Amino acid sequence: MTLSNTGSRPGKQVVQLYGERPDSAIERPVRWLIASAPVWAEPGRTTAVTLNVPTRLLA
């Protein structure tokens, strides 16, 4: 995915990916964190973001 800094100052954001499975037979939270990554971008710049998703968290 890409993240754009539309502001006038350098910025940092933590991108988070959550999963959910309402019909799961396993008792788990409604949503759980699958992956996250910090992203820095200079003003007016667009930065590519890659999240590594362990397949075991999607099972």
Image (spheres, rainbow, N blue to C red):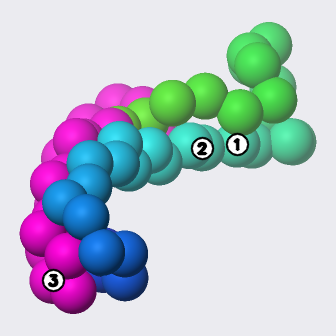
x and y percent of residue 59 in the render? Answer: 48, 37
Looking at the image, tell me whether mark 1 or mark 3 is earlier in sequence order. Answer: 1
Classify 38 as above or below 4: above
- Residue 55 lies in quadrant: top left
Question: Where residue 19 is drawn, which disc sits there?
Answer: 2
Q: Residues within 10 Å of mark 3 (few under 14, many from 20)?
A: few
Q: Is residue 10 visible?
A: yes
According to the image, label 3 marks what residue?
45
Q: Nearer the viewer, residue 28 or 35?
A: 35
Q: Is residue 7 magenta?
A: no
x and y percent of residue 42 in the render? Answer: 12, 69
- Residue interval drawn in magenta: 36-59
Mark 1 element type: strand
**Position of residue 42 in the picture relative to residue 29 (left or right):** left
Residue type marked 1: Glu
Please give the name of the residue rendered at 34% of the width and 48% of the height, measured from the top-left corner: 13
Question: Where residue 20 is drawn, which disc sits there?
Answer: 1
- Residue 9 lies in quadrant: bottom left
**Position of residue 6 in the picture relative to residue 39 (left or right):** right
Classify 9 as above or below 47: above
Mark 3 element type: loop
Question: Where residue 30 is drawn, which disc sits there?
Answer: none
Looking at the image, tell me whether mark 3 or mark 2 is earlier in sequence order. Answer: 2
Classify 46 as above or below 28: below
Mark 2 element type: strand
Query: CA–CA distance between discs 1 and 3?
Result: 32 Å
Tell me whether circle 2 and circle 1 mark residues in contact (CB < 8 Å). Answer: yes
Q: Nearer the viewer, residue 26 or 40?
A: 40
**Position of residue 19 in the picture relative to residue 34 (left or right):** right
Q: Residues within 10 Å of mark 1 (few under 14, many from 20)?
A: some
Q: Is residue 55 magenta?
A: yes
